[in-house]
Amino acid sequence: GAVVSQHPSRVICKSGTSVKIECRSLDFQATTMFWYRQFPKQSLMLMATSNEGSKATYEQGVEKDKFLINHASLTLSTLTVTSAHPEDSSFYICSARDPGQGGHGYTFGSGTRLTVV
Amino acid sequence: AQSVTQLGSHVSVSEGALVLLRCNYSSSVPPYLFWYVQYPNQGLQLLLKYTSAATLVKGINGFEAEFKKSETSFHLTKPSAHMSDAAEYFCAVSDNGGFKTIFGAGTRLFVKA
């Protein structure tokens, strides 16, 4: 089946620095990818929809300048957390529409645990 | 607008017992419904999905779910729980364009020996 690779799986950074998270579709092309944030013991909250070759669509309340999304190719989307602060510590997960599921299914990355100290 | 409500943030069953995780949805258009499982510090794995075909959907690991339009429900069941089933389960809904997926709050399943 379709595989989405997310890297890194864990990252610890100092407050004020920026962190980039990569999401790659390994064996299929993903024109659309999604970025979610998950707080401990909570559900996934959609942050933004990443569209290849165009600007990302952000959900209400998500700071565009804080969470920079780039989808420069059909297999790679990146999320950069800029000037990270401890409150940005969270589990970030990407997903892509899985063409093998007729467009009605999504394959998720394994997630990135971000800790800002 | 679409939404999902999962009844019970925690469910505890004994090994070998029936697993029932409840999910109710709200959608103004015919929904597509999904159940995902998440193990600690991992992404989500699709268990099964309903996309307007058969109302009883069979998934992986012995799970199944039944779409009941009259009850706006999509409950997840498994006849006999295994220890390895202990995880977080998310019910999700999307519209027939399959674009945005809205997740429920999740239900943590505990399996007792």
Image (cartoon, coloured by chain):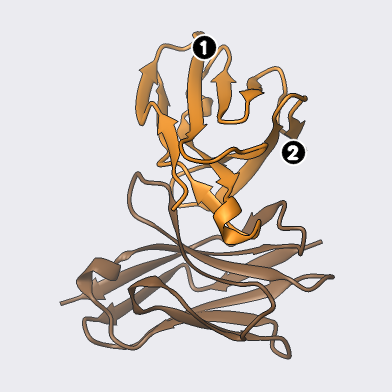
Chain colours: A orange, B brown
Outermost residue toward the top in this view: A17
Q: Callout 1, which amino acid? A: Ser
Q: Which mark is residue A45?
A: none
Residue B28 located left or right of residue B104: right
Quarter assignment of residue A14: top left
The chain holding disc 2 is A
Q: Which residue is mark 2?
A: A59
* x, y percent for residue B47: 45, 67
Q: Nearer the viewer, residue B60 or B16?
A: B60
Is the residue marked by circle 1 packed among few (<14), some (14-19), or many (20+) residues within 10 Å? some
Sequence-first tag of 2 and 1: 1
Q: In percent of the image, x 71 and y 51: which residue is there?
A: B100
Secondary structure of the residue carrying tag 2 is loop
Q: Is residue B47 left or right of residue A9?
A: right
Chain containing the residue with disc 1: A
Tally the marks.
Answer: 2
Which residue is painted at 58% across and 60% down in the image?
A101
Q: Amino acid at mark 2?
A: Glu
Label 1: element kind: loop
* Same-chain status of marks 2 and 1: yes
Give how far across and how far down residue B75 sits, in percent.
53, 81
A2 or B16: nearer the eye? A2
Q: Position of residue A79 (x, y in %)?
A: 57, 24
Residue depicted at x 63% and y 82%: B73
Q: Is residue A33 above or below residue B58?
A: above
**Whole-percent x, y for residue B98 in the image:** 71, 57
Rendered-image quadrant of the C terminus of chain B = bottom left
Q: Which residue is mark 1?
A: A18
Q: Is residue A72 left or right of residue A39?
A: right
